[in-house]
């Protein structure tokens, strides 16, 4: 009986249709949604994008970084540098911050890649602390007390506040969609096969001719590009920046929590984790410490009961993949994968 390789499933095709419809609905939010809802959605979009990028690093590249706040803060400060000193429009600084962040990540990669395992994780955190201390010394950027965006820079985004909110909202949505689609296409390419091989066994992948260093370097630079661009977007919404806030480790702690409870090593995992995080945060945030305790308990329970995360548990039980990145060999008569 004949067989063939497939790269999509009925579930993924349905999911793609539902996703496209959802994006179309989200595009219309500025025309009917209130300002508070739009600001919450913007935060959801950029947190989701950050989680997807960290998942690419750790879940596929095996690079468990606890210092991604270095690029969040770098992107935020690049926004202020480009706007104030080079008179560039705030919106245009987002891709520019991403490109500059990617360039800066290159020499950093050659340093931290000399470390392995938990030493790599600690090394990335040290890099973030160096960034924090460095920017805190720059008086032209407000030193340790930080600075605010000029009113003229804010008004350059759009003439009215409603138009500014809509522009920032659409930019955040575009970034989130671009990150998810970009990671999906990357994982379906030959680099995706290389990353899967590296994740399973670095020694085995090397014996198969995979250039582990090159594949990991590509992932690290792409993550730096995306995280820096998102950092610029974040501080467009916040308007004010300080070193302690920009390089706060809580940026990385939040996205690690999201990826762990959602499911590391899958595109669906960070989406599920982001939804769970905000569903817990919104009603419980007023309770302060109890909210943080509940988040911690949730993470512990999920790690004990579902080591592969909530999506991993669901997909294992029902054999469903909304973003299939693996090739599947099926017999022609049985070509009915879920």
Image (cartoon, rainbow, N blue to C red):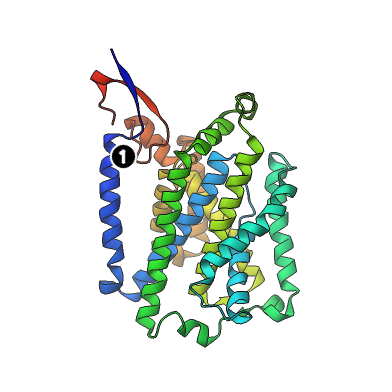
Left or right of residue 206: residue 231: left
Look at the numbered disc 1 and give the secondary structure of its residue: helix
- Taking the image as drawn, is residue 81 in sight? yes
**Res 83 quadrant in image:** bottom right
Please tell me which residue lies in front, 178 or 64: 178
Residue 328 vertical position relative to residue 107 in the rendered view, above or below: above
Quarter of the image with the N terminus is top left
Image location of residue 135, percent across then percent down: 71, 70
Please tell me which residue lies in front, 216 or 238: 216
**Res 252 quadrant in image:** bottom right
Left or right of residue 76: residue 163: left
Image location of residue 14, percent across then percent down: 25, 42
Image location of residue 154, percent across then percent down: 48, 82
- Taking the image as drawn, is residue 280 in sight? no
Quarter of the image with the C terminus is top left
Residue for point 68% across, 51% down: 124
Residue for point 54% across, 49% down: 54
Residue for point 51% across, 87% down: 152
Image location of residue 172, percent across then percent down: 42, 65
Residue 31 vertical position relative to residue 313 in the rendered view, above or below: below
Which residue was labeled with disc 1? 12
Mark 1 surroundings within 10 Å by alpha-carbon count, few (fewer than 14), some (14 through 19), many (20 or more): some
Residue 241 vertical position relative to residue 8 in the rendered view, above or below: below
Number of numbered markers: 1
């Amino acid at each position: 009986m004949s067989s063939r390789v497939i790269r999509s499933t009925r579930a993924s095709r349905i999911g793609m249709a539902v996703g496209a419809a959802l994006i179309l609905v989200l595009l219309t939010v500025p025309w009917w949604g209130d300002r508070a809802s739009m600001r919450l959605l913007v935060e959801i979009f950029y947190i989701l994008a950050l989680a997807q990028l960290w998942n690419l690093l750790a879940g596929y590249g095996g690079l468990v970084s606890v210092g991604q706040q270095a690029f969040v803060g770098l992107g935020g400060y690049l926004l202020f540098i480009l706007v104030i000193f080079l008179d560039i429009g705030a919106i245009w600084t987002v891709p520019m911050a991403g490109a500059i962040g990617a360039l800066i990540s290159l020499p950093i990669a050659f340093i931290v890649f000399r470390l392995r395992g938990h030493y790599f994780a600690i090394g990335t955190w040290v890099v973030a602390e160096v960034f924090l201390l460095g920017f805190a010394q720059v008086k032209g950027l407000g030193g340790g007390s930080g600075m605010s965006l000029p009113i003229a820079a804010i008004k350059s985004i759009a003439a009215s506040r409603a138009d500014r909110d809509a522009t920032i909202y659409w930019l955040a949505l575009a970034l989130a969609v671009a990150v998810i689609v970009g990671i999906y296409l990357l994982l379906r390419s030959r680099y995706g096969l290389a990353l899967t091989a590296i994740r399973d066994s670095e020694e085995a992948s090397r014996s198969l001719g995979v250039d582990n260093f090159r594949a990991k370097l590509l992932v690290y630079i792409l993550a730096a590009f995306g995280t820096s661009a998102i950092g610029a977007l974040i501080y467009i919404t916040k308007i004010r920046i300080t070193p302690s806030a920009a390089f706060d480790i809580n940026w990385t702690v939040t996205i690690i929590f999201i990826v762990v409870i959602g499911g590391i090593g899958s595109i669906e995992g960070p989406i599920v984790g982001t939804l769970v995080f905000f569903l817990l945060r919104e009603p419980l945030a007023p309770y302060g410490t109890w909210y943080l305790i509940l988040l911690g308990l949730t993470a512990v329970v999920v790690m004990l009961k579902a080591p592969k995360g909530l999506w991993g548990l669901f997909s294992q039980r029902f054999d469903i993949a909304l973003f299939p990145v693996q090739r599947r060999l099926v017999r022609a008569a049985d070509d009915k994968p879920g």
